[in-house]
Every structure is written in structure tokens, then in C-alpha cells.
Image (cartoon, grey):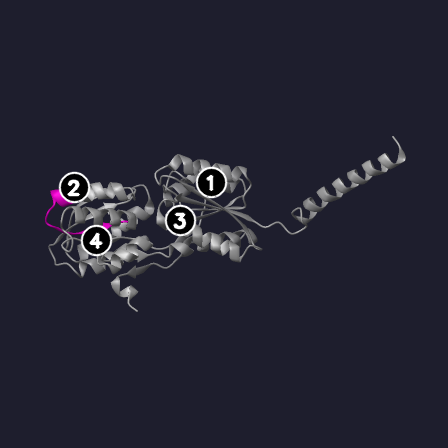
Amino acid sequence: MNRSLFSLTLLLLLMGCSSEGSTAAGGSDASGQPDKPRIALIMKSLANEFFSTMADGAEKYQAEHADQFELVVNGIKDERDISRQVALVEEMIASNVDAIVIAPADSKALVPALRRAKQAGVVVVNIDNRLDTQVLAAEEVEIPFVGPDNKAGAHQVGGYLASQLNAGDAVCILEGVRTSFNGQQRLAGFQQAMDEAQVQVVDHQLAEWEMSKANTIASSMLSEHPEIKAILAANDSMALGAVAAVKGAGREGEVLVVGFDNISAVQQAIQDGKVLATADQHGDQLAVFGIQNALELIANPDAKIEDVETPVDLITKESFAP
């Protein structure tokens, strides 16, 4: 080998060793900057405006704090596709993210996958739909919940509806997914408000958060229970399905509808008098609250794991008054 070729080869080898050594020792990326934590946001269906709003809020926050962390946004096509959401958790573990912030599609089924994430050294924060405490205990895992009191929010909405009704009136409830804690809590909050007002819940059925399914079920409810004065929907997509059913039955102005989430379409429906009220759990900020919690836990791995209750507010037509 001639002298110049040998010198070039030696120089390249030294450069390679130097680059590898600086990354390992200094925790830096290729540009020499310190590594930023990668946070994965795993949501339910992005076809649901509530979750697309959540994603937008998280991405806006990351853009404003781009020097602090990187964000990977994931969602499933169908809110009931639990297996796909489990697969997303596994994919994020394999890609070595530092944290997972998740709105689980099921309060029980996601726990084992999230336990595996924690065992792999991934920080996990639960938002929107609380994981089942008994399953968490059985799996011997602690995961903080960052989100609103869904029962209190539903109770506020139900209480406002009850103020427009009389004791003895009949209503129906459209539920979400029965294995989801937030669905259980919203049903409980609605039921409590109706019991306190002595309003009778004559029927409650699962519409699984879906507008079209809610429309079909609400139409059936209106036919089977012509005496009902209101339909309480556990999310706004189902509320919009109920609004269409009420219109189809020719009962606009007779049957009141309430929802939960405060998506933009329902905001307009409230102003138009088609929906009476909803609950705002500040979806655009909910993932942000979870991300902030995750960053704190990444920075302080030995910090005590604690739940964080976030705001939930009643929204009525008066909320839009100038």
C-alpha cells in the first residue's frame, strides 16, 4: 500500500472511532447536540374529531418546544381495534421511544403491553380513559392517569339537562364501550344526575362511540319509547347521531340531546339549538398535559408516580354569548 493511501485509511478509521466515542459518552446526536427524548402519543381513532384535535394540540406544543423533545403520533382507525393499539405499543417499544402517552381503547386489555413497556425502561402515562386499577395491581405496575373526572363532567351535563325536565320524565342513554373506564364513569354520572332529579332512565344501550351506530340505536329508542324527553350521549359523535335520529323521527324541539367532548360540530349544534349541552375536557390540551407529565418522569425517574386531574367544564348556549 502506498503512503498516501495508508494515511487516508488511517484518518478515516480515526474519524469513525472519534464519532462513535462521542455519541456513547456524551449522549449526542450526529450534529453534536444532546439527544432529545422521543415521546410516542398513542390515541384512539383519528377519525373522531376529539382525537384529531388532541393530536393537533400535541403537535403544536411540540413545535413550540422542539428543542425539548421529539413527538411520534399514532392512532387506530377504529376505536374498538384493541389488537392494533396493542401492536402500536409493541412497535413503539421496539423503536426505543423514551415515553408512551396513551389514550387506551380498553381499560384492561392494554395493561399487559404497557407493563412490558415499563419493563423495557419506557415511561408510560395514561390519558383520557383511565386504566383499570385492579388489572394494574394484578400486573404489579404503576401508571399515572392524567385526565378529567369523567363522572363529574357527565354529572354536570346531566344536571343541566335535568333542570329542563320535570320529575317523572323519561330519558335514554347512549353508552360508549362498556370496558372503557371513561364510558363507565360517564354512564354513572348521567345516571346519578337523573336519579337526583327523579327522572327515569327507561333505556341505555351501547353505541360504542360511533355516530352511525348511535343514529340507528337512537332511532330505535325513539320508536320503542315515544315518551322520552331526552337522549344523553356519552360522547359528541353519538350525540350527533342522536340529533339526526330525532330529526328523522320528526321530533326536533321535543327531544333534548346532550353529549360529552365539545367537538366543533357540537359547538355549532349547541348554538343552533340542536344540542342542549356538552362537557369540555379540553381535548386540545389533554395530550399536552400527559406529555408534560412524561417529560417530568423522564427527567426525574425516581419521582413519585401520581395522578393529575385536569379540568372539565359544562358547555351550553350561554358559553358562546358575546
Q: Which residues are magenta?
A: 222-234
Q: Earlier in the sequence, mark 1 or mark 2?
A: 1
Q: Earlier in the sequence, mark 3 or mark 1?
A: 3
Q: Report the front residue among 164 and 301.
A: 164
Residue 206 in the magenta stretch? The answer is no
- In the rendered image, which residue does mark 2 sit on? 220
- The answer to whether residue 101 is seen in the rendering is yes
Judged by depth in the image, the label closer to the viewer, 1 or 2, is 2
Element on which disc 3 rests: helix
Could you give the CA–CA distance between mark 4 and mark 1, rounded to whole angstroms? 40 Å
| Residue contact between numbered discs 3 and 2, judged by CB atoms under 8 Å | no
Residue 193: image x %, image y %? Answer: 21, 56
- The answer to whether residue 306 is seen in the rendering is no
- In the rendered image, which residue does mark 1 sit on? 115
The residue type indicated by label 4 comes to Val
Could you give the CA–CA distance between mark 1 and mark 2, rounded to whole angstroms? 41 Å
Q: Earlier in the sequence, mark 4 or mark 1?
A: 1
Above or below, 85 against 318 in this view is above
Sort mark 1 into few (<14), some (14-19) or many (20+) by Cα contacts within 10 Å: some
- In the rendered image, which residue does mark 3 sit on? 52
- In the rendered image, which residue does mark 4 sit on? 257
- State which quadrant residue 18 falls in: top right
